[in-house]
Amino acid sequence: MPDSTEHENKFDMENEDDRENEFNYENEPPFIGCKMITIFTYRKRAVFLTDEVNEILCRSLTHHIENGHIIINGYVVMPNHIHLLMRPVEWTISRFVSNFKTYTGQKIKIARDFSRKVWRRRFYDEDITDYDSFIEHLEKLHNNPVKKGLVEFAEDYPWSSYSDYIGKPGRVPVSIDSVDPPSYTVY
C-alpha cells in the first residue's frame, strides 16, 4: 500500500468543536472522504475465529454507524485483521479506531478468557481517490477470504459486506446506495 499512513492509537488532540461540521459526506459519492482502514491483531494472532468473537466486532461497528460516528461502505473480518472501507462523520478515524479497539478488546478478552492484548497499537489507512480506486479496494476486501482459502466463493463468507452488495441482509448496516452492484470478478 504505497499511499498508506501508519498511525499511533491516540485520540486526536484537536478541539472537537472546531471539527463539528468538518465531516459531512452523507450525500456525496461513496469515495469522497473514504479510506481503507486495516487493523491487525497483536502479533497477527488468529483471534477472530468464532461467531461469538466476530459478533462483538459487528455489534461495535453497528453501534458506531447507528450513532453517526462513521459510514461503512464495506468490511471484512479475517482471522487476524479487519478491513474497513469507511468515512468519518462525527468522529475522526483515529477516535473511532481507538474507541473500537478499546471496547472490542475488552469484550473479546472476556469472551475468549485471556489476558493478552487483542489489537496491535497501530492501524493503517489509505485514501480512496476516485470511484475506480473505491471499487478496486471493495473487490480486494470481498475477495480476501477466498484468496486466503477460508471459503471457495465470496458469498459463502459470513463476516463481510459482500452479501449486502448482492441483495442479502448483512451483519453490519453498510452504505451501498451510491455503489453499483458488483460487476467485478468475485471468486
Image: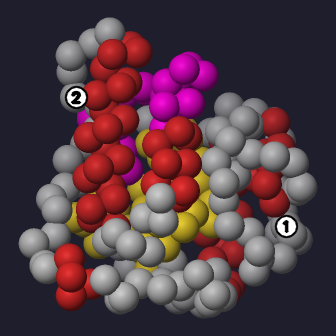
Q: Which residues are magenta?
A: 39-57
Q: State the image quarter where residue 37 is shown.
A: bottom left
Magenta stretch encompasses residue 5: no
Picture coordinates of residue 65, whole percent (x, y): 53, 58
The front one of 29 and 146 is 29
Q: Which quadrant of the figure contains the N terminus?
A: bottom left
Q: CA distance from mark 1 to mark 2?
A: 37 Å
SS under mark 1? loop
Q: State the image quarter where residue 90 is shown.
A: bottom left
Label 1 vs 2, first from the N-terminus: 2
Q: Is the residue 66 above or below the residue 52 in the image?
A: below
SS under mark 2? loop
Q: What residue type is disc 1 on?
A: Pro
The residue carrying mark 1 is: 182
Q: Give me the residue at 36% from left, 88% from top.
A: 21
The residue carrying mark 2 is: 117
The front one of 29 and 26 is 26
